[in-house]
Amino acid sequence: MSHKKSPSSTPFIHGEQRPPRLLVTWQPGAAGNEAIELAAWLARTAPVRIRVVHTIVHLWPQSPRGKRRRKYSKWMDEQNRHFAESVRQVLTEAGVDKSHWDDEVALILDGSSEHALLTQAATDFNADLLIVGSRAATPKGRFLAGTTTDALLHSSPIPLALAPRAPKLSKRGITRVNVAFLDAHDTDNNESLAYGAEAAYQMQVPLRLVAFSPTGLIDANLSHALTSSSPLADEWHEQALSMCDQARDRVMDDYPDLTVHIELASGAGWQGAIDSLKWKKGDIISLGSSTQGHLERVFLGSTAAQFLRHVSVPVVIQPATHF
């Protein structure tokens, strides 16, 4: 692991040839403005460049032609105009300075697949991060993926930033980076650790390495509940601490001046384990993809999916790298 990375290795790098690019998916009056608020929060941390997109999915297989095409183009022009007005207003209300706006700050995409449209838009924008919000009716401080977000969580070629419902975010931006280890195999995939360490280094904020040990869950191999008094729980605690110690050593080799803390989160289920820690308004979590996913893609396993349902701070998920 080395901090000499490409400009796209983290969305928080300062001093590169271009500012990090954030692509935000947002629909006026729909689920909420959490994705916009998260982009504004990152803009308080780094000199980012923001583009906001909205997708319109149609059912017909081919684009309309002739007179219908002209009517449709006129309608799309009108929709783009209204959307651009809404985006400028919501960015201003969120406190995003115009210096962070892309020249084409608002764009409506139309096609037959929302997931494909967003993936292509991220490629066209050369985005470093794709920001999505939680689905409608999600409880405050929680994240639930909608259909399109779920698809992105299994195939996005770039990192995803997940904005929980009505997040409480620090006015100073990011003040601490957390790297989450959900199981012993997380050490086999170093993307989240490298990403989190680089982000903390660039922003000069502390790095917290957290191993989660939820009790009361069913052990897949033994088919019984893993309780806090179980010998398996004690063994996991030892493994988790060892895993974090090794991760800290790797980080300190490359970032000797970085402040690194280790914590073990244990509690009843994922909710209890997560709530056993103190979370700050300036926290962000770096989470890795499953190594079982596709080459150079985000792939969220079932464990991570359960974890996300109980997290109240923003999460960045990196695509896994396969060799």
Image (cartoon, helix red, strand yellow):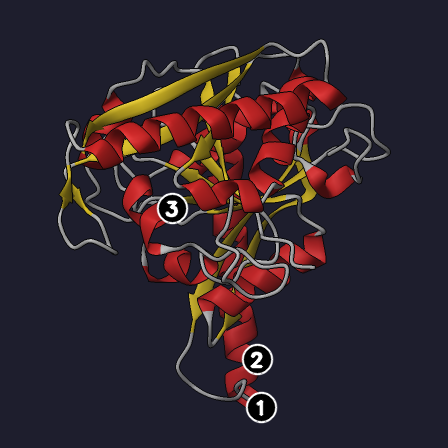
Residue at 59%, 21% (x, y): give it.
Answer: 248
> In the shown orientation, is residue 284 left or right of residue 45?
left
Q: CA distance from mark 3 to mark 2?
A: 25 Å
Q: Residue at x 71, y 9 (%)?
A: 257
Nearest the eye: 2 or 161: 2
Residue designated by label 2: 70
Q: Is residue 303 above or below residue 260?
A: below
Give me the residue at 56% from left, 66% from top. Answer: 294
Task: Tell me which numbered mark, 3 or 2, is placed earlier along the sequence.
Answer: 3
Residue 148 at what x, y percent from top left? 39, 61
Secondary structure state at the residue bearing disc 2: helix
Give the camera-side residue of 41 and 219. 219
Residue type for callout 1? Gly
Labels 1 and 3: the sequence-earlier one = 3
Residue 10, percent from left and from top: 67, 35
Verify CB contact (< 8 Å) between mark 1 and mark 3: no
Q: Which mark is residue 66?
A: 1
Question: Where is mark 3, residue-wise?
Answer: 28
Above or below: residue 306 compared with residue 124: above
Disc 3 crowd rating (10 Å Cα; few below 14, some 14-19, many 20+) is few
Measured from the top left, where is residue 102 in percent x and y?
A: 68, 40
Distance, label 1 to label 3, CA atoms, is 31 Å
Q: Are marks 2 and 1 in contact (CB under 8 Å)?
A: yes
Kindly indicate the quadrant of the structure image that contains residue 216.
top left
Q: Element under label 3?
A: loop
| Element type at mark 1 | helix
